Image (cartoon, rainbow, N blue to C red):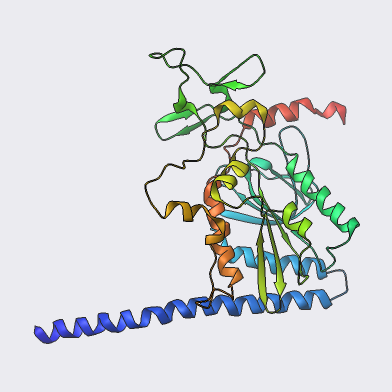
Amino acid sequence: MAEETQSTQDEQEAMRRAEPKIIQQIAQNYIHLEASITSQLRMAAERHHVTSGTFREDIWRSLFEQIVPRKFSIEQSVFIIDSNGRVSKEVDLAIFDEQYTPYIFRHGRIKYIPIEAVAVVVQCKSNNVSGSKNGDNLKDWSDSIARLKTSLKSVTRLFQDIVMGEYAYELDEAGQLKLPLTKEEKPKPDYRKLLTQTSTRPIQILCHINNSSPATHVELFDIVIHPKGERLEVEIAPQLPNLPSWYESLNHKKDARYKNIIKPFNHNSPSEEFPRALDVGSYRVFEDQARTKEIGLLSLTFQLNQLLMLINNPILFPHLAYVDMFNANGLKSV
């Protein structure tokens, strides 16, 4: 019996000694993966025929397929639409949720995805991302996404309640949704009706193959990814330095109608670690103790998935809003 106990202890000790090496091997695998991706992107840059763009998109798609949860689907060369009838410019890669929004409207081989489903949009560019003309094109592309609006005209059963979206609220004199009053404490508003999600937007990512990014691109997009030597450089928008700012930007896109029903990010936590957890820069992984050599792909894995968890499930699908859209644009007008 004593021999068996000693043997178990020896095995456990051997496993404890091996654990750091296992973690190092996982990190090293990401370094090798980065080198493989950058090598493929350089190859794509050297191919000057018509398929190089598609080849480049395939490389970036394979990267995202390895780091986003399986609940998300990835489609290439699609358009994003909203229930107001607005259509984006062509999106190279769209990462979207099909659990709550299963609809992809098709016209022949062209695919249109409702904005309510889309968590991430990716623009894949070559090494030609500098210059005023290219900057204007990128801004036009980004603006075509930003002008799309999700709708709260949804009715859904969740657990023990029926969620009524904006139907649960009345409008005030200024046309803004207002909180209902409690029965017990009129005229105090019922703050239990505050929403953590009112008008979402997708995370915008620019992928290119230059060794550096113009500052304007880092400010225009949420995340910029590009090769730097044999590694990947991941740049996060400086205007969104922490999780509260991301929460506000992703879940409460500026819409005056909703400003009275927004639930703020909870800053009140007794944990000393909580302030650090809010800093997006904390979600970075390095291969050295001095923190001079970042493993960009591993950092991106944690950063992007943390942001996707802030969105959680993209906004519930507003069926009636799209019914109204189709009826307002009937076949007789075609």
Image position of 277 with respect to 291: above or below: above
Q: Quadrant of residue 284?
A: bottom right
Question: In the image, residue 23 lies at what x, y percent?
Answer: 44, 76
Image position of 218 with respect to 168: above or below: below
Question: In the image, residue 143 lies at what x, y percent?
Answer: 78, 45
Q: Measuring 88% from the left and 72% from the top, which residue is drawn there? A: 49
In the image shown, does 158 or 260 lie closer to the viewer?
A: 260
Number of numbered callouts drawn: 0
Question: In the image, residue 201 lies at what x, y percent?
Answer: 65, 43
Q: Measuring 48% from the left and 80% from the top, which residue is drawn there? A: 25
Q: Give left or right: position of 114 versus 265.
A: right
- Can the viewer see residue 46 in this picture? yes
- Can the viewer see residue 71 in this picture? no
Question: In the image, residue 182 lies at what x, y percent?
Answer: 43, 17
Image position of 289 with respect to 175: above or below: below
Q: Measuring 81% from the left and 74% from the top, which residue is drawn there? A: 45
The quarter of the image holding the N terminus is: bottom left
The quarter of the image holding the C terminus is: top right
Q: Quadrant of residue 213?
A: bottom right
